[in-house]
Amino acid sequence: MKSSQAGINVKILGKDFLVACPDEQRQSLTQAASLLDRKMREIQNSGRVIGAERCAIMAALNLADELIKLENTGGVPPETTNKIRNLQSKIEAVLHN
């Protein structure tokens, strides 16, 4: 994953996406993109979901479910939750362009 002044280039399911990102969030965004790529590949390899967009939605739902479970058990601090939601919004925006 390459970075540039305008943003960071992440690869998800073999596609490159340029995402605007403050310097202090680049590592988090890179990790989020890597996690999303892994989740999407797992879903894609299961053969139950066809199409990258549907795969992305299923991955986002699975990650949101995991986040909610962690929040409900007090496992994630609120600032981490906000960062994750912010990164998820950025990833979803890029995938829908």
Image (tube, grey):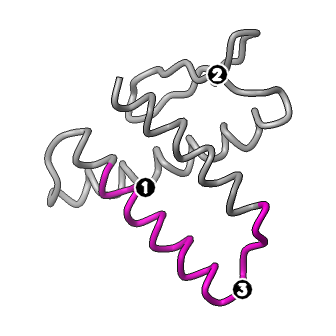
If you read the primary sequence from the N terminus, does the residue marked by circle 3 or circle 2 appear first?
Answer: 2
Instruction: Give amino acid for label 1.
Output: Lys
The quarter of the rendered structure image containing the C terminus is top left
- Residue 91: x and y, percent? 50, 37
| Residue on which the image places disc 1 | 39
Task: Identify the residue shown where x is 26% and y is 50%.
Answer: 44
Instruction: Give amino acid for label 3.
Output: Gly
If you read the primary sequence from the N terminus, does the residue marked by circle 3 or circle 1 appear first?
Answer: 1
Numbered tag placed on residue 74 in the rendering: 3
Report the Cα–Cα distance between label 3 and label 2.
30 Å
- 65 sits to left or right of 97: right
- Comparing 52 with 83, the one in front is 83
Secondary structure, mark 1, is: helix
- Highlighted range, magenta: 57-79
Task: Identify the residue shown where x is 50% and y is 28%.
Answer: 11
Look at the image and say whether residue 63 sits in the magenta stretch. Answer: yes
| Residue on which the image places disc 2 | 20
Few, some or many C-alpha atoms within 10 Å of disc 1 (few <14, some 14-19, many ≥20)?
A: some
- Residue 62: x and y, percent? 40, 66
